[in-house]
Amino acid sequence: MNDSKDILAVGSIAFDTIETPKGRREKILGGSSTYFSVSSSLYTNVSLIGIVGKDFKRENWDIFKKYNINVDSVEKSDGLTFSWGGKYNHDFSKRDTLFTELGVFEKFKPNIVNSYNQPILYLGNIQPDLQFDVISKVKKPHLIAADSMNLWIDLFPEKVKELIKKVDIFLLNDEEAIQLSGHNNLNKIVSEFLSYGPKIVIIKMGSKGSVIGFENEIIRVSCVPNVEVVDPTGAGDSFAGGVLGYIAQHGLKNPVKAVMHGTAVASFTVSAFGLENLYNTQLNIVDEKIKEIKIL
Ligand code: AMP
């Protein structure tokens, strides 16, 4: 990992209650930055910015420790940790949010230690104002990547467009991209987002793979075939972890390969509940999976 860039990420750390056609789990460790950090720690040193409550137990901290994830900028507060419940339909094509309890997240003001060495900054799907706040507080990031979600596009579409202008890499899923742009031609959406300024735009399409735009190219990449989906929660964050992990090691010269890494890492996440399968993943197994992914 010596020549790699470090990664600094902000997002949610959560307890999730998840119902899928394959079963149910209650109050398991989740959150966008948990999935992201465990995934990207396969590639490089990762630090987190975030907040947890008094219900966050030693065994939860131990997960970050096990993956060598630096939590110096994770605040421990008196309230309860952010918690989220989601339920998937019979074929995983739809997810309903059952509850969102912000807890300590409601008053979250990122307090950043700033001893990081020009990191790649990843802004997970939190409120755009918090993403802007983190951008203004992190000194000289090597590059900035961001994701968003339907909730923020509903509430603050102009701020999400502002965010695209401030980042080098922008990721979004297909439904959200359609929602934000107001039309459904994905190639046109990618070109439109690229015209705001990022070097790379990636639209995630779940089991249909992804579309990547960079320079004058727009390329489609498949998903990993024949994966038995158990719980898709965190797929997007694990994907981002694989993409940025690869970029931390190799730079921006091969965005398609970076997307293949994201695709492979996400395939481990979705094949078990929560982080169960991601915990056992290693880079050599990711490399094997990549052989199954096709450029379309
Ligand atoms: P994904 O499946 O990629 O959408 O990510 C799911 C993760 O996002 C879950 O572990 C949730 O805890 C977390 N999450 C859900 N809603 C929010 C929200 N409004 N803000 C931040 N994180 C959220």
Image: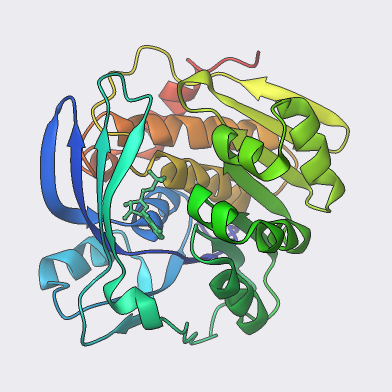
Q: In front here: 205 or 286?
A: 205
On the image, which quarter does residue 155 sit in?
Answer: bottom right
Residue 117 appears in the picture as rendered: no
- Looking at the rendered image, the quarter that the C terminus falls into is top right
Residue 80 screen position, x and y as percent:
20, 76
Q: In front here: 240 or 15?
A: 15
On the image, which quarter does residue 267 sit in?
Answer: top left
Q: How many marks?
A: 0
Q: In front here: 84 or 220?
A: 84
Residue 255 appears in the picture as rendered: yes
Residue 183 screen position, x and y as percent:
72, 32
Q: In the figure, is residue 234 to the left or right of 124? A: left
Identity of the residue drawn at 60% across and 79% down: 133
On the image, which quarter does residue 204 sit in?
Answer: top right
Vertical relation: 6 (above or below) 94: below
Q: In the figure, is residue 272 to the left or right of 268? A: left
Vertical relation: 61 (above or below) 259: below
Residue 99 screen position, x and y as percent:
25, 55
Residue 136 screen position, x and y as percent:
66, 81
